[in-house]
Amino acid sequence: MKKRPGADNPAKPKRSAYDKALGLLARREHSRKELKTKLRQGGYEGEETTDALDRLGEQHYQDDDRFAEVLLRSRISQGYGPMRLRQELKSHGLVDARIRELLDAVEVDWNASAMAQLRRRYGGAGSKDPAERARRAQFLLRRGFAAATVRRVTHAEVDDADDLP
């Protein structure tokens, strides 16, 4: 395995947990839980990690709400549904009440988003074939759309196909 230059150099002082976390935040937003995990993987322990994260929070360099908003915008633009977003935010350590608030504040037409994902993936034509409709429904469910939304969209797609000459 190839080692980084200076990795075993005892003369070079180890970066503080604060500096390491600041470097991570310089690249992209991170949740507090994610930073804590990365610092522990980097060999930083207990109080040093907690102090660094508290300091970053006080200085507004790390903010879970800001992280969540950035993540939501990104995932919505990628075509993910509310169930997937809720699960991902929860995995980053956000509490359920705050997740509900954030999702309620987002103004997204989930039906239109699901329909756009179907069109992107399968083209504009709907399908009357039950197996194909099931495949499309599974695709939307995996993307994190609610079952009611999936049902509405897949039935609307078939209704649109009926209207074609």
Image (tube, rainbow, N blue to C red):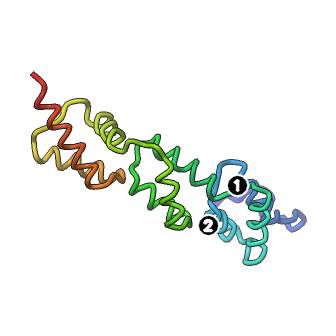
Up the image or down, 125 lies above or below 43; here it is above
- Residue shown at 47% from the left, 53% from the top: 103
Figure quadrant of residue 109: top left
Among the two numbered marks 2 and 1 on one chain, the one whose residue lies closer to the N terminus: 1
The crowding category of the residue bearing disc 1, from other C-alpha atoms within 10 Å (few below 14, some 14 to 19, many at least 20), is some
Q: Secondary structure at mark 2?
A: helix
- Residue 20 left/right relative to 160: right
For label 1, the SS is helix
Q: Position of residue 49 (x, y in %)?
A: 74, 71
From the viewer's side, name the closer residue of 13 and 130.
130
Q: Is residue 158 left or right of residue 52?
A: left
Q: Which residue is mark 2?
A: 33
| Amino acid type, label 1 | Leu
- Residue drawn at (24%, 43%) of the image: 153
Residue shown at 17% from the left, 32% from the top: 160
Residue shown at 62% from the left, 56% from the top: 65
Q: Position of residue 135 (x, y in %)?
A: 20, 48
The three-letter amino acid code for the residue at tag 2 is Lys
Q: Nearer the viewer, mark 2 or mark 1?
A: 2
Residue picked out by circle 1:
24
Q: Is residue 78 left or right of residue 18?
A: left
Quadrant location of the C terminus in the rendered image: top left
| Mark 2 nearby-residue class (10 Å; few <14, some 14–19, many ≥20) | some
Determine whether 161 is above or below 135 in the image.
Answer: above
Q: Quadrant of residue 37?
A: bottom right
Measuring from the top left, give residue 149's x and y in whole percent. Answer: 28, 49
Q: Could you tell me residue 99's position as x and y percent?
A: 50, 60
The image's mark for residue 122 is none
Q: On the rendered structure, is 22 left or right of 74?
A: right
Q: CA distance from mark 2 to mark 1?
A: 13 Å
